[in-house]
Amino acid sequence: MSARGRLMQALPAGGVMVAVQASEGEVRDLLSGFEDRAGIAAVNGPSAVVVSGAQDAVTKVADRLAADGRRTKALSVSHAFHSPLMDPMLDDFRKVAEGVSFGVPTLPVVSTLTGAPVPAEEFCSAEYWVRHVREAVRFADAVTSLADLGVRTFLEIGPGGVLTAMAQAALEDGPAVVPVLRADRPEEVAVTTALARLHVHGTPVDWSAVLAGRGARRVDLPTYAFQREHYWLETAIAPAAPAHQPSGSDNPAETEFWEAVENGQPEALAERLGLAEGAPLDSVFDALATWREESRNRSTLDGWRYHTVWQPLADPSSGPLPGSWLVVAPDAGAAEPYARTLRDRGAEPLCVTVADPAADRSALVELLRDAVAEHSGPVSGVLSLLALDERSHPTHPGLPAGLTATVALVQALGELEPDAPLWCVTAGAVSVSRAQPVTRPLQSLVWGLGRAVALETPQRWGGLVDLPTAPDGRALARLADVLADAAGEDQLAVRASGVLVRRLARMPRATGGTDGAWKPRGTVLITGGTGSLGGHTARWLARGGAEHLVLTSRRGEAAEGALELAAELGALGARTTIAACDVADRAALAALLDGLADDPAPLTAVVHAAGLPQFSPVADTSLTELAAVVSAKVAGAVHLDELLADRELDAFVLFSSVSGVWGSGSQAAYSAGNAFLDALAQHRRARGLAGTAVAWGPWAEGGMAADGGAEEYLRRCGLPSLPPALAVSALQLAMDRDETTVVVADVDWPRFAPSFTIGRPSALLAALPEARAALDSGGADGGPGGDRGEGAASDLVRRLSAGAPEDRHELLLELVRKEAAAALGHPRTDAVEPDRAFRDLGFDSLTAVELRNRIGTATGLRLPMTMVFDHPTPTALTDRLLGDLFPGGADGPHPDAGPDEARVRQTLASIPLSRLREAGLMDALLALAPGAPGGVATDTGTDGDADSAIAEMDLENLIELALGDSEA
């Protein structure tokens, strides 16, 4: 057996680790009596220690600390390293270490074993590494030791930058701590950023070596700062390139191209340009221009492409489920195992059976009222199993009863307004991997519905949980874990491997040539073919070589522009048939397909682009509207899937929408239908059939978003419309790569992410660095986390305090007008009149968030999202801000406050939070809070240490808590 194998056998199992908020001395005192079973594993600072060892010993130490109000956090590990539990393997490890040849280090080494410089001879001994396995890691001591030796720059070479944050916490201000790699960024971006940070901190960087072969060149900077003011819309000149679009040397394709040029590789260059050997010079120029345009377009498409992925969630705690839970199910038998699971967790299930597939809002209101009337206490949550009911609605056969009943339940809860979240359960509705495909696509309708409901009624929404088709006791127990503590997640799947959460992620960059490009042939059927999207798709197919295009719509040739489109397609070489056929009518669709059976060009592909828009909140959505919107998407797709199930097609393309991916307010039915299309594509693939669903963002030049100002509204919210020429290129790319589901949208994340999460945080965006950065910075153009910070707020407070009381209002009003002008894009403050309503100035939900973030950063106040609408003019908002900054009025402190409160507030507001922590004042401030004898009571079950507990506070919150004004 190898040395590694022997060591793995010798490693002890079953150990645990826990991080505690306590000093090393305190922990060592508590370890007295447990030295043979537990020890200190790591010292990360003066009050952060990791204890490792046998579970009973570590638990007792943690319990003792918790009893003193100290915070603890369990760490997930396979073995308890750096503790007495390592003793059984030390002899084996020593033998291996003694067989290793050590080289003398050429650089000085500071050891994390001792926290100090280590002599070379000690570093090269086997005994040193045996101690390293057994004893604690003194990370903070090693970092501070380096700083004491004069080290001013720390570079972490590791996969995720984890140690960088720990080093910064251990160091005083001054030294630069730079990670080479970041888990949330591509390697090229992370490394280049690290080099740039080293450069600006004074570390020499050989930029000629870094930029070699990338086409970089020096440019002269202007001799003074230019200032320019545009009097036209910049988008009228050229579409703004998305922030993620590579250009110049950042574009990998262009980098490879210019390397071929610089290295004198004519064959490689000709191959890239598609030229024959010895082509004349003019053809080279034409080919270069074409190649450059295609390269830029491909780069743009890469920036538009996303997909959803499922990531494992750390096992939720198996905590109790107190209170009463409404369990709403289609029959008592379906509810029983769920009710039993809730009962086992301490909850009282109140079962509500919705047996009638035609039950509407009023019926659900009565059923819920009856269930609650028999119970005296409040309801803690609502668990809906209605989605499991796949029976057809008696009046609208195209709708499953599970969907209509869930809509009725949402509407009934809106009428009753219980203070309880709604969780919807499905089984087999989502695909978490190729090995675990969708088995019940109809239930995915509720997933699309739920994503929209989360945006419309965030205060009453819990989330969506998909279970296996036949959930066992373990799956139900994990469901209970999620209901007890979902950790901020609202889209989860329970599988045998554990609990998974849904994330939006970027598609891998498209690489390679077009040798395997998909090409249409024979006859292609396009539903909704005379509409805007259908027309653009038809032109693309005609140019690609389709012989016969069959375009269906409800009106057929009577549809506006239908005959002109047919003539245009004919000019492109495609024979065109325009048929009046509602694909939601199965018989009519079957007749159309039968008529194509004798066509000399066989049917090879289908593009389902039919659909109806919706602009009504779920509370006002009638059954008729629900049926019309859903059936336009779902019924046609179902009929095509069933009628062509035995046909070997080259492509079965479903035009979906981003509304089905992340939801859309006032479009619950539309979101539901599109979520189904994504699930159907996955379901077809699992059956070995062709299937591709493209979830589109809004299209320009027509489409559902082009009417009634919707296109401009979506652009302001961060979803600019897609140019049709590039959109069909994205469709071609999806077909070339044989993708099952793909999201194609031009998302302006600094605008979209804050707007999307204004009412409810979304873990769906957690895997996207651009979205996280936008939310961390507070949104577009100057939100919190930008160039301004605590210093700006402190400066403002000092200026206001130093000025005469009668001047404070004018100074603050000028700030409000300046930030309002910036949020609206005006270059001057005079564009914002003091007494004109914000709505009249052009504010909407997005610009309201921007203004709130800007003023919050400038003043240091935590302001509500509805600030602009609660205080409708700049003058009214200024009055509110002045009252918050000077609670006692412009002339002095609040009459009920202590004599020094105003001075305390001003002084504290001028001190950065980091300085308060360093000075040890944080605990003292928290101890001043009412009802906190000796300090604020802490919950030992929460994660993190004291700093993480107050990280959610801003300075204003802290002052309010310390001075007893907080309502919390």
Image: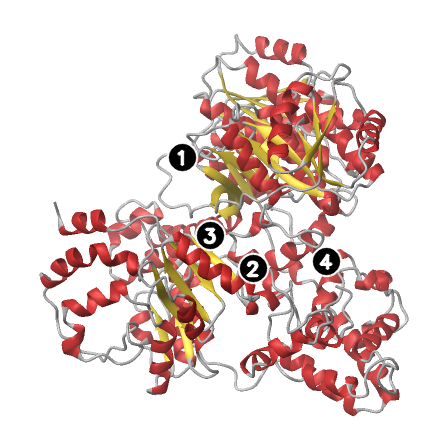
Q: How far across and down, in percent of the image, does residue 370 sit? A: 83, 28
Q: Mark 2 points at which residue?
A: 940
Q: Name the residue under label 1.
A: 517
SS type, badge 2: loop
- Cα–Cα span, label 3 and label 2: 49 Å
- Residue 179 in sight here: no
Q: How far across and down, in percent of the image, does residue 182 sit? A: 42, 61
- Residue 544 in sight here: yes
Please tell me which of labels 3 and 2 falls first in the chain.
Answer: 3
Residue drawn at x 61%, y 26% as measured from the top left: 443
Give the left or right position of residue 845, taking residue 32 as reference.
right
Determine crowd level at label 1: few under 14, some 14-19, many 20+ residues with C-alpha closer than 10 A.
some
**Residue extending farthest front:** 33
Q: Quadrant of the C terminus?
A: bottom right
Q: Are marks 3 and 4 in contact (CB under 8 Å)?
A: no
Please tell me which of labels 1 and 4 falls first in the chain.
Answer: 1
- Cα–Cα span, label 1 and label 2: 58 Å
Q: Do the residues labelled 3 and 2 touch (CB within 8 Å)?
A: no
Residue situated in front as seen by the camera: 646 or 48 = 48
Please tell me which of labels 3 and 1 falls first in the chain.
Answer: 3
- Cα–Cα span, label 1 and label 4: 41 Å
Residue situated in front as seen by the camera: 205 or 867 = 867
- Cα–Cα span, label 3 and label 1: 18 Å
SS type, badge 3: helix
Q: In the image, what residue type sits under mark 1?
A: Ala
Q: In which quarter of the image is the N terminus?
A: top left
Q: Given this view, does label 1 or label 2 mark the residue nearer the observer? A: 2
SS type, badge 4: helix
Q: In this view, does 120 lie above or below 967?
A: below
